[in-house]
Image (spheres, rainbow, N blue to C red):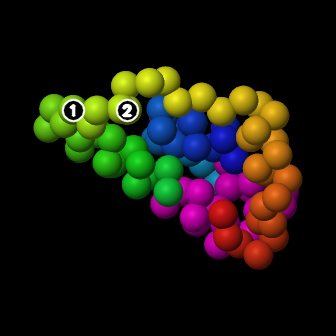
């Protein structure tokens, strides 16, 4: 999922059917794949819009936001992607 999101962010013209097939083979439903694509695209759009307008972060957002691998894996273990929802 993250490889797909990174590829969609950095090289969207290189997304191909195989990328979607790999997500399906990993266990994501078509609805979940659509969610992944839409959420990734939306955040890319909003970030580019904010950057293009010179929007500054609000006070308190200048700290680096970090999630450890352990925290991420714990969060992932609690999710059920088979129902097509992130």
Tell me, for residue 61, which label it has, or none. 2
Local secondary structure at mark 1? loop
Q: Can you see residue 58? A: yes
Displayed quadrant of residue 34: bottom right
Q: Is residue 12 left or right of residue 75?
A: left
Local secondary structure at mark 2? loop
Q: Can you see residue 22? A: no
At 44% across and 24% down in the image, what residue appears?
63
Span highlighted in magenta in the image: 19-38
Q: Given the current orientation, which residue lies at the most extreme bottom position?
A: 83
Q: Is residue 14 left or right of residue 49?
A: right
Q: Quadrant of the C terminus?
A: bottom right
In the rendered view, tell whether residue 29 sits above or below residue 42: below
Tell me, for residue 5, which label it has, or none. none
In this rendered view, identify the residue nearer to me: 54 or 14.
54
Q: Is the magenta region chiefly helix, strand or loop?
A: helix
In the rendered view, tell whether residue 1 sits above or below residue 28: above
In the rendered view, tell whether residue 72 sits above or below residue 38: above
Circle 1 sits on which residue? 56
């Amino acid at each position: 999922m993250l490889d797909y999101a990174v590829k969609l962010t950095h090289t969207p013209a290189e997304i191909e059917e195989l990328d979607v097939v790999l997500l399906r083979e990993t266990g994501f439903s078509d609805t979940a794949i659509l969610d992944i694509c839409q959420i990734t695209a939306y955040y890319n759009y909003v970030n580019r819009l904010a950057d293009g307008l010179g929007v500054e972060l609000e006070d308190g957002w200048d700290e680096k936001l970090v999630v450890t691998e352990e925290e991420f894996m714990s969060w992932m273990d609690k999710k059920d992607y088979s129902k097509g929802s992130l």
